[in-house]
Image (cartoon, grey):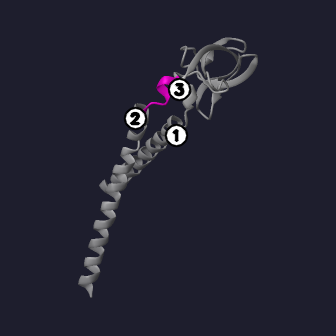
Amino acid sequence: MPRHGSLRTVAIAVGWIIAGAMFLGGMISAYHTLTFSSALAADPVRAYATVTDQFIDGFGGDPSVDYRYTVHGRTYTGYGAGELGGEDPNRLSRGDPILIEYAAAAPSESCTCDPKGSADRAQLAGSALYTVPLVILVAWQVRRWRSSSRVDRSRSGAAR
């Protein structure tokens, strides 16, 4: 039967791992929100693009597609997961249409997302909330370190 101390150690380790993963996810989401194209968010133009490839975005990632679209005779490319039109990238094939939005002022900037909701402060605040568990754990750990160093100093002072 495991000792109480070892269960506590495992629980603390799992807490650190979860908090670290949440922190990383929140930071990635915040980075995406902060770097989202302001031109695309300000004046999106809805259009259909043509799927050129289907793939999994990253190890264990989301199904996504590459696409191409033409604006004023010039062809551009992009990629996304089909969020805007509700398309399922797993069911899309090369040549299928996919709904996108591109920036009127910068047509090379596009997405399959809703650009009006991709760069708002509410999403940024939500991303920041993912950092809270790690902040709490760090504060708790610092408090433990300080209290244990005080105990060590008082013991070493008493031993003299």
**Hey, what amino acid is under mark 3?**
Ala
Residue at 44% x, 41% y: name it. Answer: 22
Q: Amino acid at mark 2?
A: Gly
Please give the residue where the numbered disc 3 appears in the rendered image.
Answer: 41
Magenta-drawn stretch, dominant element (helix, strand or loop): helix
Question: In the image, is residue 120 part of the stretch drawn in magenta?
Answer: yes
- Describe residue 29's horizontal placement relative to residue 12 as left or right: right
Q: Residue at x 54, y 31 (%)?
A: 38
**Label 1 near label 2: C-beta < 8 Å?**
no
Percent from the top left, x then y, of residue 6? 36, 55
The answer to whether residue 1 is seen in the rendering is no
In the foreground, 71 or 140: 71
Q: Nearer the viewer, residue 134 or 129?
A: 129
Q: Which residue is mark 1?
A: 31
In the picture, measured across the screen, residue 121 lies left or right of residue 43, that is left
User: In the rendered structure, which disc, 2 or 3, sits on the residue that comes first in sequence?
Assistant: 3
Mark 1 and mark 3 lie on one chain; the one further toward the N terminus is: 1
Quadrant for residue 55, please give it: top right
114 horizontally vs 141: left or right: right
Q: Is residue 112 above or below residue 130?
A: above
Q: Nearer the viewer, residue 20 or 75?
A: 75
Q: Is residue 13 magenta?
A: no
Circle 1 or circle 3, nearest the eye = 3
The amino acid type found where label 1 is placed reads: Tyr
Numbered range of the magenta stretch? 115-121
Which mark is drawn over residue 86? none
Is disc 2 surrounded by few (<14), some (14 to 19) or many (20+) residues within 10 Å? Answer: few
Q: Would you call the spot at circle 1 few (<14 residues within 10 Å), some (14-19), or many (20 or more)?
A: few
Residue at the front extreme, as displayed: 105
Secondary element under disc 2, as helix, strand or loop, is: helix
Residue 126 circle label: 2
